[in-house]
Image (cartoon, rainbow, N blue to C red):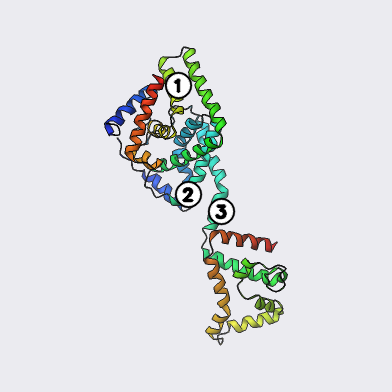
């Protein structure tokens, strides 16, 4: 009967005989799979894995980068956004003048733009004083949490981004830095 | 004879390490499976350069997708499935090239007969040309069964068909080859 094991074995034996071969392996996928084709030789086989590895290297590095804990990456991104907002205030997303408004960046900016603008106007001494106050034991924990809340929201937003949106955000951040 | 063989423990270890991003472990997998992958590409494309490129791309794609490899079939079957799909796409994109190759194969078959080689060689050559003319599904089953020596169960998994359907396709392929080769 067509489709039974016995018939398949007979068919296989006939075919192998017709190819002038005695089978490639044990029927369990353990042959070398080279029956019927010219062997390119030992040098080719010795070099093949290295050639694959050479083409693999950029992918391996990319995968390593992508497999970094997303939270750490998100924190780094938030920091980049924060630094960019302070250092290049003209390039941060704006919703008022419309010149460089970017809805994607605006959605994930770690704090309202106005807050960053006011921070960017502070002198170094004022910033240090603010830091001291925030870190002082006397500062109520709730107050610190309040101040950090916008950053948490941004981190959570980045955590839930799809890969496409995440890649897009990375590109835009890179462009912003240049 | 038709049962799937278990993967060697070394291979399992390399797979697990490769899944965690270990390129060295993946290189061992390449070394282990490079011949069957290249062999399949060569038989389907009949050109060393093209087969070499497809074989490399098979492993690159495997690296990208190894996280999704669940071990339901053997690594070899999984790689051959990737390779077969790449070959199929290549054939589709280079239809004229393949027709030329077919003509080349036919000519080689004629030459073999004309030059008075041993009868077995002539027959094998004509069989190879006959396999190239089979319908795609039958050719795939013959490739995986005869040249890669895979069990029908794994052939069925690789092609997304039932085991019986794989055996029936194989039977029809043999019948067609007998008729065409004589």
Label 3 element class: helix
Q: CA distance from mark 1 to mark 2?
A: 37 Å
- Rendered location of residue A38, percent (x, y): 48, 26
In the image, are marks 1 and 2 on the same chain? yes
Mark 2 packing: few (<14 Cα in 10 Å), some, or many (20+)?
few
Label 1 element class: helix
Q: Report if residue B127 is visible in the image.
A: yes
Give the residue at mark 2.
B65
The structure residue drawn at horizontal position 34% and vertical position 30%, both measured from the top left corner, is: B171
In the image, are marks 3 and 1 on the same chain? no
Chain label for disc 2:
B
Residue B125: give its label. Answer: 1
Between disc 1 and disc 2, whose residue precedes? 2
- Rendered location of residue A177, percent (x, y): 68, 63
The answer to which of A34 and B161 lies nearer the viewer is B161
Number of marks in picture: 3
The quadrant in which the C terminus of chain A is found is bottom right
In the image, are marks 3 and 2 on the same chain? no
The answer to which of A132 and A112 lies nearer the viewer is A112
Give the residue at mark 3.
A62
Q: Is residue B61 left or right of residue A111?
A: left
Q: Are marks 3 and 2 in contact (CB under 8 Å)?
A: no
Mark 1 packing: few (<14 Cα in 10 Å), some, or many (20+)?
many
Chain label for disc 1:
B
Q: CA distance from mark 3 to mark 1?
A: 46 Å
Chain label for disc 3:
A
Mark 3 packing: few (<14 Cα in 10 Å), some, or many (20+)?
few
């Amino acid at each position: 009967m067509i489709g039974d094991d016995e018939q398949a074995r007979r068919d296989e034996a006939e075919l192998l005989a017709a190819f002038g071969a005695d089978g490639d392996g044990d029927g369990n996928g353990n042959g070398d799979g080279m029956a019927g084709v010219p062997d390119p030789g030992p040098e080719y086989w010795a070099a093949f894995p290295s050639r694959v590895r050479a083409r693999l290297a950029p992918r391996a590095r990319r995968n390593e980068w992508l497999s970094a804990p997303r939270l750490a990456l998100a924190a780094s991104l938030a920091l980049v956004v924060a630094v960019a907002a302070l250092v290049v205030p003209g390039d941060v997303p704006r919703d008022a003048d419309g010149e460089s408004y970017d809805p994607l960046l605006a959605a994930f900016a770690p704090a309202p733009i106005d807050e960053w603008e006011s921070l960017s106007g502070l002198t170094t001494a004022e910033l240090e004083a603010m830091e001291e106050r925030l870190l002082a034991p006397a500062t109520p924990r709730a107050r610190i949490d309040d101040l950090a809340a916008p950053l948490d929201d941004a981190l959570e937003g980045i955590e839930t981004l799809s890969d496409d949106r995440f890649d897009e955000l990375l590109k835009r951040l890179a462009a912003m830095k240049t | 004879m038709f049962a799937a063989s278990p993967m060697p423990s070394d291979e399992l270890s390399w797979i697990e390490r490769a899944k965690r991003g270990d390129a060295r472990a993946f290189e061992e997998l390449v070394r282990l499976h490079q011949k069957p992958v290249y062999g399949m590409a060569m038989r389907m494309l009949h050109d060393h350069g093209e087969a070499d490129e497809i074989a490399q791309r098979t492993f690159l794609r495997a690296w990208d997708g190894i996280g999704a490899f669940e071990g339901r079939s053997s690594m070899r079957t999984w790689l051959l499935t990737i390779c077969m799909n790449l070959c199929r796409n290549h054939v589709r994109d280079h239809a004229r090239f393949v027709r030329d190759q077919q003509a080349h194969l036919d000519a080689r078959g004629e030459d073999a007969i004309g030059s008075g080689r041993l009868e077995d060689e002539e027959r094998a050559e004509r069989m190879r040309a006959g396999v190239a003319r089979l319908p795609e599904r039958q050719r795939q089953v013959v490739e995986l069964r005869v040249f890669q020596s895979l069990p029908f169960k794994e052939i069925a998994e690789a092609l997304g068909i039932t085991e019986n359907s794989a055996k029936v396709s194989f039977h029809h392929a043999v019948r067609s080859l007998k008729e065409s080769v004589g």
